[in-house]
Amino acid sequence: MTRVGLLTSGGDCQALNATLRGVAKGLYNLYGDEVELFGFIDGYKGLMYEDYRKMSPVDFTGLLTRGGTILGSSRQPFKLMREPDPNGLDKVEAMKYTYRRMRLDCLVVLGGNGSQKTANLLSQEGLNVIGLPKTIDNDLWGTDNTFGFQSAVDIATDVIDCIHTTASSHNRIFIVEIMGHKTGWLTLNAGIAGGADIILIPEIPYNIDSIISKIKQRAAHGNGFTIIAVAEGAVSQEVAAMDKKERKKHLAKRKDPSVSYEIARLITEATGREVRVTVPGHMQRGGTPCPYDRVLSSRLGATAAQMIQRGEFGVMVAIKNRVVTSVPLEEVAGKLKLVDPASDVIGEARLLGISFGDD
Ligand code: F6P
């Protein structure tokens, strides 16, 4: 009998259930009755506190289109993994104990950056671990795409599309704030797809004067409205030049609720024009996975099942150049995949007249 534990960790996204289904269907088809699956509740928390349920094939039906996660999820920061819990429990030892007590052959972790770091830690501690790349941010190292990303791009693009029509009716300046604290993949893609005039991402620090002159230039050419797609982690050139400590202090003192509101205020001060801010927030992580994500999750999940059968552990399943492959967890752990400001897509966007607020 092969015994496999499953958990979904960190912020949720649309195709977690579709991926669980892919792993489960793959395993049931490969092993028949010779496999048992266990779902840990609320991510690593379930593994720490032995909170799990035995799953059966029926648990994995109807999941392809269902958002969220049937297992629940929680954030268990990697940086606190080596610190005991409030009752003095050693979290890493507790997770290893649960794994061994349940006589698991493998633990499958559906998670983003922090979760893959913990997956790597557990792998280095001797557990058989396979990671699956989840996040709407698409910032996991070693994979071209993460599941959840494309669904979030669709939602953020829909938001920009809706804003576009009302912005043009009223000749207004609109800011749409898109998720992504550290990377701008989602903002870049939704911004291009939604025809944003200005796109601000953390990887390309902006200059407020450049944003204002783009708005004025558009107005001079008869375009009364301007759409600005802003990643929640976008930073000005002044802030980008600060060291980490200074930057933290500066951001803590910010009087506006977010970078978008700060930019809106500065534009109004400089132009006298009204600026509206729209924040779709967690909507971007919710609802049904798009067809692309359903296919990606199914492929990644099925491949994870094959890897379990082959005994290929200590890896994250990945997609590179449309081929499903794997990458060692130790290569993934702690690295962010950033948008390269010199990449083709940025150059092409500039050629279309999109400003990144840095000219
Ligand atoms: O990591 C995914 C993500 O959606 C980020 O883009 C966002 O900043 C963050 O999670 C917010 O998540 P939460 O509110 O759950 O902490």
Image (cartoon, grey):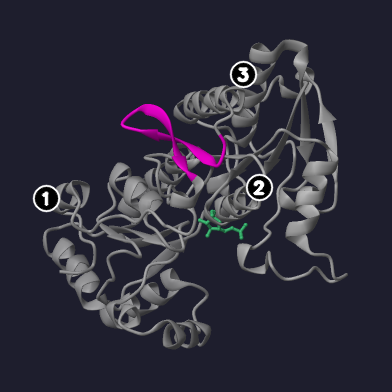
Secondary element type, mark 1: helix
Quick one: which residue is furthest to the right in this view? 87
Whether 213 is among the magenta residues is no
Return the x and y of residue 210 as percentages of the image width and height: 20, 72
Return the x and y of residue 273 as percentages of the image width and height: 31, 73
Left or right, residue 316 beside residue 86: left
Circle 3: residue type: Gly
- Residue behind mark 2: 126
Return the x and y of residue 158 as percentages of the image width and height: 43, 41
Circle 2: residue type: Gly
Q: Give the range drawn in magenta.
A: 313-328
Q: How far is disc 2 from disc 3 in space, using C-alphas?
A: 25 Å
For the stretch drawn in magenta, the main secondary structure is: strand
Whether 326 is among the magenta residues is yes
Please state which of the two labelled residues, at mark 1 or mark 2, is closer to the viewer: 2
Q: Is residue 64 visible?
A: no
Instruction: Report the disc number at residue 26.
Output: 3
Q: How far is disc 1 from disc 3 in space, using C-alphas?
A: 45 Å
Q: What residue is at 49 percent from the left and 31 percent from the top? A: 293
Left or right, residue 322 beside residue 128: left
Q: What residue is at 81 percent from the left and 35 percent from the top? A: 103
Left or right, residue 306 beside residue 81: left
- Residue behind mark 1: 351
Return the x and y of residue 137 as percentages of the image width and height: 46, 50
Label 3 CA crowd tier, 10 Å (few <14, some 14–19, many 20+): many
Q: Which picture quadrant has residue 276?
A: bottom left
Secondary element type, mark 3: helix
Q: What residue is at 37 percent from the left and 51 percent from the top? A: 185
Looking at the image, is 28 positioned above or below residue 288?
above
Evaluate if marks 1 and 3 touch, with contact meaning CB atoms under 8 Å apart: no
Between 10 and 4, the one lying in front of the other is 4
N-term-proximal mark, 1 vs 3: 3
